[in-house]
Image (cartoon, rainbow, N blue to C red):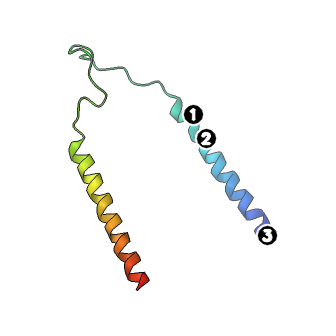
Amino acid sequence: MKTFYKKPLVYLAISLLVLAATPAFADDPPDPPSTHGENGNQPAGGGTPVGGGLALLIGLGAAYGFRRFRQAQKEGD
């Protein structure tokens, strides 16, 4: 098979697989549990604290930025 035909065939195969899987996402959401609404309105996520995860994300971002800064300094020498 010529190289000219390989790319379109790969794109066509991927497109068909994606289109075949699309109806699987069309299901109705599940019913809420029987205790839903007994305690009044709940915030999204059930009131889970995000402070620890946010601090971790900021810390990892700062460490990555510092590493990139140090690498840029070493390349400039």
Residue 20 is tagged as 2
* Residue 36, position as x, y percentages in the image: 27, 17
Identify the residue at horizontal 35%, vertical 64% (top origin).
65
Is 76 placed above or below 32 here? Answer: below
Tell me the crowding category of disc 1: few under 14, some 14 to 19, or many 20 or more residues within 10 angstroms, Cα based. few
Q: In screen coordinates, is 8 left or right of 58? A: right
Residue 24 can be seen, yes or no: yes
Instruction: Identify the residue at horizontal 26%, vertical 14% (top origin).
Output: 37
Q: Quadrant of residue 10?
A: bottom right
Q: Pointer 1 and pointer 3: residues touching (CB < 8 Å)?
A: no
Q: CA distance from mark 2 to mark 1?
A: 7 Å
Q: Which residue is mark 1?
A: 23
Amino acid type of the residue tagged 2 in the rendering: Ala
Q: Nearer the viewer, residue 36 or 46?
A: 46
Element marked by disc 1? helix
| Viewer-proximal residue among 47 and 4 | 47
In space, the residues marked 3 and 2 are separated at their CA atoms by 27 Å
Marks 3 & 2, CB-CB < 8 Å contact: no
Q: Earlier in the sequence, mark 3 or mark 2?
A: 3
Against 2, residue 24 (above or below) is above
- Place residue 76 in its image quadrant: bottom left
> What residue is disc 3 on?
2
For the residue marked with disc 1, what is the amino acid?
Pro
Residue 1 seen anywhere in this rendered image of the structure: no
Kind of residue at badge 3: Lys
